[in-house]
Amino acid sequence: MCVTGLAGMYNLQKLSPEVIPPSEIYAGTPVLLRLRLHNAKRLLPSFLISVRCEGSKGITFPVIPSSKTVECVIRAVFDARGRTKVGKVMVSSVFPVNFFNRYLSYDLDTEFLVFPQLIRCGARGEGSEPVRSGSAFRQSRGLDGEIEGIADYSGREPLRMIHWKLSARGDELLVKEFGRQAASPVVISLADMPGQTLEERISHAAWLIKHWCSMRPVGLRLETDIFPAEAGHHYGLRLLTALALYGEQSR
């Protein structure tokens, strides 16, 4: 018993977990987290290592070689929006005999942001056009908007549209193709969103931002902050961040 106990504890030594979240996490929606486990032992591997994070099911690695790192993907669900930490990670093993399950607990301070839950909304937005689900929008070519593609240089495009890095790889000049921001902007007012609670209104606003940000300029009006209407995925993430952190101090 003494020998197996020592072997079991040494099997867990010098193991360090790491959790890498995806770039976008929405409350109430299952996501895949990348879980890495580093074995810093120089000579001996670790056997039958189980790892479990808060809010997810555990996974078992049959063997982790010495001085190596193994990686897997685990499924997790986060219930609330806002800043969240990975929290406790349990590393356990039944090695060398299946009598005792020894474990070590790690507190990971890796912090990430959980966006609001997305609840489909058919509310109208402010602007010259109503926001309706299924509205069509055609992006014409222009000099603004986001990059939609790469084309051959015809001689009519301004020099600032030339993609110099890609052109340097070949013999022909290539230019960037942009979408034109021709659609009227949508300004989402949190106070005008449907829903009986603040969280419902935030979830409806988040759905509208996610739905429209890649197709037309979107703005956001909160109680004290106003974000001007702009287009693009990255700007949409900025608006979702504002919603995720809204009222955080009072929660």
Image (cartoon, rainbow, N blue to C red):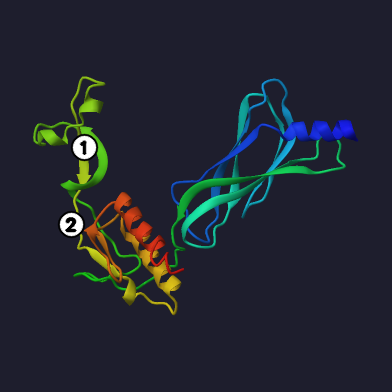
Q: Quadrant of residue 120?
A: bottom left
In the rendering, at what x and y percent does residue 242 appear? 35, 60
Q: Position of residue 14 (x, y in %)?
A: 66, 31
Q: Is residue 168 above or below residue 89?
A: above
Provide the secondary structure element on which disc 1 rests: strand
Which quadrant of the figure has residue 61?
top right
Residue type, numbered disc 1? Lys
In the picture of the structure, the residue carrying the numbered disc 2 is: 182
Q: Residue at x 21, y 44 (%)?
A: 178
Residue position for label 1 = 176
Image mark count: 2
Q: Residue at x 58, y 52 (%)?
A: 76
Q: As displayed, is residue 232 above or below residue 159?
A: below
Residue drawn 45% across and 71% down?
199
Q: Is residue 96 visible?
A: no
Q: Position of residue 208 (x, y in %)?
A: 35, 64
In the image, taking residue 243 as reference, residue 152 lies left or right, namely left
The residue closer to the viewer here, 240 or 118, is 240
Q: Is residue 62 visible?
A: yes
Vertical arrangement, residue 125 with respect to residue 151, above or below = below
Q: Secondary structure at mark 2?
A: loop
Residue at x 22% of width, y 34% of height: 151
Q: Nearer the viewer, residue 171 or 56?
A: 56
Residue 189 disc label: none
Identify the amino acid type marked 2.
Ala
